[in-house]
Image (cartoon, coloured by chain):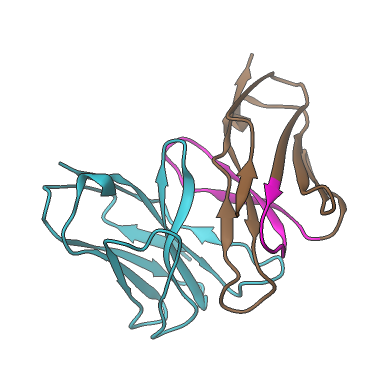
Amino acid sequence: GQNIDQPTEMTATEGAIVQINCTYQTSGFNGLFWYQQHAGEAPTFLSYNVLDGLEEKGRFSSFLSRSKGYSYLLLKELQMKDSASYLCAVRDGYGGATNKLIFGTGTLLAVQP
Amino acid sequence: NAGVTQTPKFRVLKTGQSMTLLCAQDMNHEYMYWYRQDPGMGLRLIHYSVGEGTTAKGEVPDGYNVSRLKKQNFLLGLESAAPSQTSVYFCASSDRDRGRNEQFFGPGTRLTVL
């Protein structure tokens, strides 16, 4: 079956570092995405991993281990505006028209002063 | 460059009524998608299209129909709305469905069925 697990909620302090974990079990794998979604708004793209290792983009980094079915999103120097839901999504399949995204339920991050 | 737009933004329907949600993208993307987002359920794919004139079923297609008559537009129809279809509906598009090509999302339509 298809399953993506993320913590439901997390709380962190402004200026700190937070790590949001995602584990997945899918019939195929062709990349993992992280999206940010502020309340009442559309999801926006944050990062993409398809090979094992760390991808860094400013204050945000994302890590992937395909053998463990595991990824994390690391947010550094937290700001109040980082309070949002963070969605982990796996692209299932190996190409062609069946290459769809499977989303986790999202992790609601609250950044406190 | 407006990206992905959706109309309407809000709608209230009575059970049994019909409506059409319109999605438009100006990025010349081939792929378009309709999702619904419910509390505790995450985004679930309803239908998708891999090009003009094509449509395919996603994870939760029952009760919905779609059409992609023009490359830039993707319509989602509810023929006979039910309270279970109360949700936030997001349209998305992508250039290709492989590699880093992420999906770009519209602002959403909040639908309530009474």
Q: Colour of chain A?
A: brown
User: Which is more toward the observer, B52 or B72?
Assistant: B52
Q: Position of residue A13 (x, y in %)?
A: 69, 17
Please tell me whether residue A46 belongs to the stretch shown in magenta. Answer: yes
Left/right of residue A27 with respect to residue B110 in the rendered view: right
Q: Position of residue A84 (x, y in %)?
A: 56, 33
Please tell me whether residue B71 belongs to the stretch shown in magenta. Answer: no
Q: Which residue lies at the image location 31% right of the left edge and 62% below the top edge?
A: B62
* Location of residue B78 (image quadrant): bottom left
Q: In the displayed structure, would residue B51 be above or below residue B7?
A: below
Residue lying furthest top in this view?
A113
Residue lying furthest front in this view?
A1
Left/right of residue A43 with respect to residue B82 in the rendered view: right
* Location of residue A60 (image quadrant): top right
Q: Position of residue B56 (x, y in %)?
A: 43, 75
Q: How many marks?
A: 0
Q: Which residue lies at the image location 42% right of the left edge and 81% below the top edge?
A: B71
Q: In the displayed structure, would residue B111 be above or below residue A98?
A: above
Residue lying furthest bottom in this view?
B53
Q: Position of residue B99 (x, y in %)?
A: 71, 69
Q: Which residue lies at the image location 21% right of the left edge and 44% below the top edge?
A: B83
Magenta part of the protein: which range?
Answer: A24-50
Quarter holding the C terminus of chain B? top left
Q: Colour of chain B?
A: cyan
